[in-house]
Amino acid sequence: MITSAMYEPAQVVERHEPGAFIPCHPEPRAQDPNLFQIILGARHSLIDNWIADYYRSGLDSFRVLRRQIVFVNSPEHIKYVLVTRHDNFERKSPQMRRALEALLGDGLFISDGDIWKKRRPLVADIVHKRRVPEFGATMEDAALALAKDWAALADDTEIELTSEMAQLTAMIIARAVFGKGLSRSSAEQVITGFTAYQRATDSFNLGYFLGWDDGWSSSGGSGKRQAIVMVHEVIDSVINAHLAGEGDAGSMVDLLIRRNQRSAGSELDLTALRNEAATIFMAGHETTATTLTWAWYLLANAPWVTERVHAEIKAACGARPPALADLPQLPWCRAVIQETLRLYPPVPLLPRQALAADRIGHIEVEKSALVMIAPWLLHRSADLWDKPNNFLPERFLEGKKINPFAYIPFAVGPRICPGMNFGQDEAALCLAILAQQFEVIPRPGYRVSPVCRLTLRPDGGLPATVKRRSDPPAHN
């Protein structure tokens, strides 16, 4: 535990102005942190130690101990790293690989080289956007089931939104991936386990900065090992049930197995299949859950946006619950999710390791250097975005042009998240279904603070109550 005597987190800023909301974010540091502050800051939150100069597009290079760090925060150079020279910068940083390998093995998110090249087409095909409509009913049913639970709550019952959204998205991804429902207790076990895993993970990896190109393995102690057991126990049980014939034909794992069997000599073994299923499951539920949690926080503080959301849901759906097919008529719901992803990208840092020496702009890059791309900073760069710290969903409405290399919540290039369309549609649909029926009210006076160890969450969660709206929809 990092105490205030050892490290002082950045002050969190949040402001309300007439017709405007500047949501919570750490105030930029006045000066560059020293080595001690860098190490402790990384272990507290990966978004906490940036100075104001980094909230603008640009390039920089500096050293931490024996390692070169290259900071890349301009669209043209991001394109160079993630697209033009993708082969040289495809490898995730040792910090990220070591932090996640115990949980995900060699799953697609942290693999590279031949393993990544072999598995990416298999996974990308089963989560392709053309397949999203097949899972519309799963998303709708899960969101409506949560709405039913919320409607049964006694007045003023407090819930914790991060957990509620994680359970919702775990139910959806379990059904989509494995073709099998997940019990509430199992969902809670995964959520509790992953929360504990993040808390126990060392996000700095001293060995890498001392000169070991692959960093040091990360044990994390008994707490981390127990967290892994909690997550793997649930995932293994649903995979085993599927392999035993209890899953549905057409689920993602079913498609993965069938495509794997047709892969002409490059089949994945059972461990590899488990790792990929676990990666899809963990990425699919965690990132969408945090996005929805932040979206509720933003809407609760911007009633003028909430009014537009409610108006378009009523115009598109009338008294019936929204469905996946309605999303083209719900641009404000989608824009809220896109703006949430800009302000609070679930993975706010995209670190890469240079396989060979290179040159980015005017900077000579050493072999094995850490190349840091930070959506957290890119999305808030004052020279790339108008009012970058304001919540303005309208910037994503029809006709507005967004530079694809200035907005990268799912990365960009060959390693763009294959589940991007699934996740965005899932988040927009769940938001519409629940917003139609409920007002979500964060606990009065509660100070929300973003913190990142692996993913970007509200520190300590987000307690709230839900209030039934006065004109709830009719149910079929």
Image (cartoon, rainbow, N blue to C red):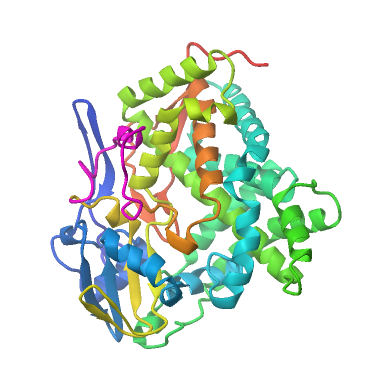
Q: Is residue 147 positioned above or below 67 on the image?
A: above
In this orientation, which residue lies closer to the viewer: 155 or 208?
Answer: 208
Where is the N terminus found, in terms of image quarters? bottom left
Magenta-colored span:
383-406
The image shows residue 276 at horizontal and vertical percentages of 65, 63
Residue at the spot 42% in from the left edge and 61% down from the top edge: 453
On the image, the x and y values in percent for residue 193 come to 58, 57
Disc tally is 0
Q: Determine whether 106 is above or below 428 in the image.
A: below
Q: Is residue 66 visible?
A: yes
Q: Is residue 265 left or right of residue 312?
A: right
| Residue 177 image offset from top left, x and y in percent | 68, 50
Among the 4 quarters of the image, the one containing residue 64: bottom left
Q: Residue at x 37, y 22 (%)?
A: 308
Residue 225 visible in the shown view: no
Residue 44 lies left or right of residue 194; in this view the side is left
Q: Residue at x 34, y 26 (%)?
A: 305
Q: Residue furthest left?
A: 30
Residue 341 or residue 5, whichever sits in front? 341
The answer to whether 376 is drawn above or below residue 97 in the figure is above
Q: Is residue 78 left or right of residue 317?
A: left
